[in-house]
Image (spheres, rainbow, N blue to C red):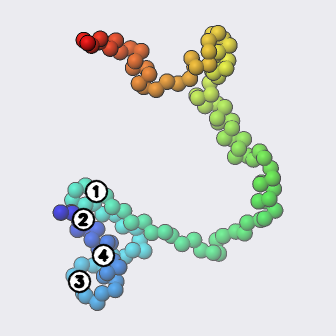
Amino acid sequence: MQSICPRLTPLRALGRIANSRASSSKPAVDLSKPQVVVCPNGVIACWHPKTSFPYEHTRPIEMADLSFEKNRKESVYNDAVMSDYEKSKMRQGPNNAELREIFYTNKHEWYTRTREERLYDVAAPVPERKK
């Protein structure tokens, strides 16, 4: 049997209640405002309707600015992202090609390995079976 949160029931049945003429002793749920309910099993259900943004508060988009940004290869955002990428911990230290030249090894030595491959290195040898 499916358990239904009693406080969430008005939200689920809103379409049926709005179209029916039956009266109820429960107060009507105002779906224009955010609603939060806690079910008996601990689940939190939230309703947050989309808020409308008045047209009077909008600004027009200049088409000249859009075409300039599209033609420009390096924008302020790209510069910031690339500088953060260069400073990140992942990019510190030499890359695989530099490591290969430093330690005189092949390129496969410096690629990441899966968990199973690492386990085979430290695991006990496979016992020989009797024939």
The foreground one among 77 and 106 is 106
Residue 98 sits in quarter: top right
Name the residue at 45% across, 69% down.
49
**Residue indicated by mark 3:** 24
Name the residue at 30% across, 63% down.
37
C-alpha span from label 1 to label 2: 9 Å
Nearest to N terminus: mark 2 or mark 4: 2
The foreground one among 102 and 88 is 102
Dot in front, 1 or 4: 4
Residue 58 sits in quarter: bottom right
**Residue indicated by mark 2:** 5
* Count of numbered circles on the image: 4
**Residue indicated by mark 1:** 43
Q: Secondary structure at mark 1?
A: loop
Three-letter code, disc 4 = Ala
- Residue 94 in the image, given as x and y percentages of width and height: 65, 20
Q: Residues within 10 Å of mark 2 (few under 14, many from 20)?
A: some
Q: Secondary structure at mark 3?
A: loop
